[in-house]
Amino acid sequence: MVSKESRTIVREKKHKRIRNRFSGTAERPRLAVFRSNNHMYAQIIDDDAQNTLVSASTLQKEVKAELEKTNNVEAAAYLGKVIAERALEKGIKEVVFDRGGFIYQGKVKALADAAREAGLDF
């Protein structure tokens, strides 16, 4: 009988392969995305200094207050806009997008598109 690996293990393996190809620098930090069943999280990370520069999630009060639900495409798009605005306030214009092993569709794509529209380059 063939047994399948869990989706979490497959995603983590994909993420490790993706992370071998690039990392965030001071000039071009990494926009890392994580989504759970209930929330989404986005961080802009400088891997050289091992420092999180900007973060946003649907758990934060000011973000959650604007949303009806925290686990849909609209919430992801709003989170992309918020993370881009916070990054631009800190002077970050260019990032490397790290999808975290998730498939680039739905919520992950909505977050990326909203961040691009709000002014981030990647």
Image: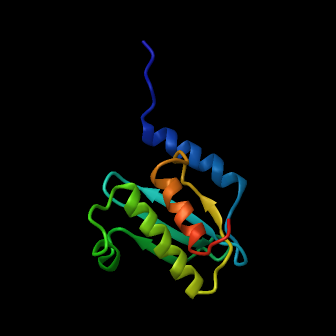
Q: Quadrant of residue 120?
A: bottom right
> How many numbered circles are shown?
0
Residue 94 lies, with reference to residue 74, above or below; the image says below
Instruction: Give me the residue at 49% from left, 72% from top.
Output: 81
Residue 101 lies, with reference to residue 122, above or below; the image says above
Residue 6 lies, with reference to residue 29, above or below; the image says above
On screen, residue 64 versus residue 78, left or right, reads left
Closer to the camera, 57 or 105?
Answer: 105
Closer to the camera, 25 or 67?
Answer: 67
Residue 110, percent from left and from top: 49, 57
Q: Quadrant of the C terminus?
A: bottom right
State the residue lying farthest toward the front: 117
Residue 9, percent from left and from top: 47, 40
Instruction: Give me the residue at 64% from left, 77% from top.
Output: 49
Residue 79, percent from left and from top: 44, 68
Instruction: Give me the residue at 33% from left, 56% from top.
Output: 71
Closer to the camera, 100 or 51?
Answer: 100
State the residue lying farthest toward the top: 1
How has the structure been colored for display?
Answer: rainbow
Q: Quadrant of the N terminus?
A: top left
On screen, residue 118 versus residue 21, left or right, reads left
Residue 11, percent from left and from top: 50, 43
Instruction: Give me the residue at 34% from left, 60% from top.
Output: 39
